[in-house]
Each structure stands twice: as structure tokens, then as C-alpha cells.
Image: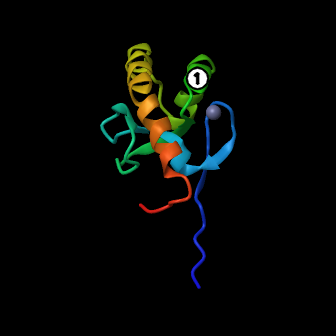
Amino acid sequence: MKTRKIPLRKCVACQQMMPKKSLIRVVRSPEGEVSIDLTGKKSGRGAYLCGQVSCFKLAHKNRALDRALKAPVGQEVYEQLARDFLAVEEEFIAGRDQAGEDDDE
Ligand SMILES: [Zn+2]
């Protein structure tokens, strides 16, 4: 029998441990570009946020993303992320709700 461990990650804003799948990954590429990674497959240093705008705002306020990514995240990057975040939020929440018990990847 194979037991599958659910990978847990911590939201950098509220510090809650959650299944990786229910978090949004923000990644800093080796080139230093910060972006939202919905696929979870982009290379680079990642930080996780729960899919809530409130957590994104908190991470902005206390610079949690900067710390997690070990790089200063510029204001314009936060603005871009905020737009991306709003754009993916619905899709993300819909996907998460649909996922239900069907854990197929
Ligand atoms: Zn959070």
C-alpha cells in the first residue's frame, strides 16, 4: 500500500499551514522576475499565499513576500501581483471547490 503524503506549505502572510494545492505560489525566477505561478512548475524561489486578497494585502504590508523570496519586491511588482491575484482568485477558488474529493492530478 502506498500512502500519499499531502505536501503542506505555509502561507507567508497568515502563517497557516495548508495543503500546497490550496495555496497560490509566487515565484521569483532566476532572472529575478516575480510572478504568480498557478501551475506550481515554474523554477525559482517560491513563496505561498492562501488564495485570499486579504492575505496578499497583509503580505504587502508586512513585506512577508520580500522575506520569503529573499529579495526586495518592488511596488510595481506588488501592483502587478495584485492585478494577477484578482484575476486568478475566482478561477483558483472555483478550481479548489471543484477539486473536492477527487484528488487526481
Ligand atoms: Zn494566508
Horizontal and vertical percent position of residue 43: 35, 49
Q: Nearer the viewer, residue 95 or 39?
A: 95
Q: Which residue is denoted by mark 1 in the rendering? A: 63
- Pick the quarter of the image with the C terminus: bottom left
Is 97 rendered above or below residue 35? below
Residue type at mark 1 is Arg
Is 22 rendered above or below residue 6? above
Horizontal and vertical percent position of residue 2: 57, 81
Is 61 rendered above or below residue 49? above
Is 76 rendered above or below residue 93? above
Horizontal and vertical percent position of residue 76: 38, 14
Q: Nearer the viewer, residue 100 or 7?
A: 100
- Pick the quarter of the image with the N terminus: bottom right
10 Å crowding of disc 1: few (<14), some (14-19), many (20+): some
Q: Residue at x 59, y 61 (%)?
A: 6
Element type where label 1 sits in the image: loop
Residue furthest left in the image: 31
Q: Nearer the viewer, residue 92 or 49?
A: 92
Horizontal and vertical percent position of residue 13: 63, 30
Does ligand 1 reach within 8 Å of label 1's beta carbon? no
Q: Quadrant of ligand 1?
A: top right
Q: Residue at x 50, y 61 (%)?
A: 103
Q: Is residue 18 left or right of residue 92?
A: right
